[in-house]
Amino acid sequence: MIILFHGTGDDDSKDENWMKWVTILMRHAGESVLCLPGVGSGQQEAACAFGQSFLEALAGEGNARNVIAPMDIPDGLRASLNAAASDNSELHPVIKGTWRTPMDEMEAIHAAQRAEGGTNAIGIKTRAAVAAVCARAYKRYAIEPMPIRMIGHSRGGSAAIATHNVLRWMGIADVETLSLDPCHGVKKATIKEYTSVVYSGKVRNIPAVKEVGTGSTWAYYTNRARITAGEGADAGTLVVNNDPLETIEHGHMGKLTSLPKPGKMDGFKAVFGSGSKAKKIANKAARQEDIRNAVTELEAGDLKGLFAMAEDKHGDLADKQYVHRAVLDLLVPDWDVIWQENPMFAGR
């Protein structure tokens, strides 16, 4: 099973976001995929609905095919998740509730869902709860369940790490996670351990230097922590923090290309000539249509072809390609052997 978490403000409505197309291509290749909208995005209220749709589509409604054996929970994991699952938290139904079916649990998460904003961490717990319930159901009901593989960007990266931990709480340890510059929100005195410390599986973390939203390299206002393995973690737990990417902007790690916002001012061109709002709207729509048309020509699972559409912005293409290689490493076994002649990945 593959779980994808969009970054803040991003979702499947934006054709330039590669997670949308990875979902479609990998589903066509026979994978079970859940893709959740970003915190504060236009689809934020649909997170639980996406989870419900995934549950409805699972093969094996009725009796579970597979048993998830209970596991001892490390003290640090128990403490961090108990602290995260307060009475008004979306994680409360998952960590402290008792529910008969996954759908019951999903409804309880939806009932607990709070309004999301652009600067706080609200929304991370919703996605972690939804994803964990879906992954556990997949492990129980799927005919031949695969390991859980997760990718998250920005606050979606923090949600992926949180899900990684909730799954270990549930007794699911064969999880591999790729976090892309995970962000917990505006800086506070401490970083929540359930989004930064893991106790099982494998985690690869790829940070970026440039700050969220501004692209600044001198003013840092968000919490973007390294991921570590906690004391008492399972044997074989592996955490790798790559060197920070220096040229890509934080917000562009989940994009094939960067399309201008139609309402953005750009000097006199924002009012007159090719920079007008109407022109920008038309240009963006045309570019998005180009992406849609190109994806329809790809074969099932052809992530190489998808990532070949990536475009440079201010010298960031090499960093984009590094991110895309990491995605391929996780989702497409032996891709480097199959596609080693493709020059777009050379040297990284």
Image: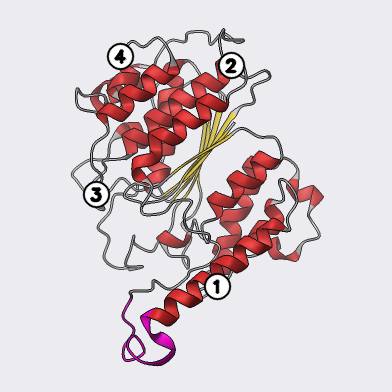
**Vertical relation: 76 (above or below) 186:** above
Which of disc 2 and disc 1 is earlier in sequence? 2
Which of disc 4 and disc 3 is earlier in sequence? 4
Q: Is residue 173 visible?
A: no
Q: Nearer the viewer, residue 347 or 26?
A: 26
> Type of residue at label 4?
Gly
Q: Are marks 1 and 4 in contact (CB under 8 Å)?
A: no
Which image quarter is the N terminus in?
A: top right
- Residue 306 in the image: state x and y as whole percent: 66, 57
Q: From mark 2 to mark 4, how far is it between C-alphas?
A: 21 Å
Q: Which mark is residue 141?
A: 2
| Residue tagged 1 | 286
- Residue 203 in the image: state x and y as whole percent: 51, 37
Residue at x 62%, y 46% (from the top left corner)? 24
Residue 265 magenta-drawn?
yes
| Residue tagged 4 | 97
Q: Is residue 160 visible?
A: yes
Magenta highlight: main SS: loop
Which of disc 4 and disc 2 is earlier in sequence? 4
For disc 3, the neighbor class at 10 Å (few under 14, some 14 to 19, many from 20) is: some
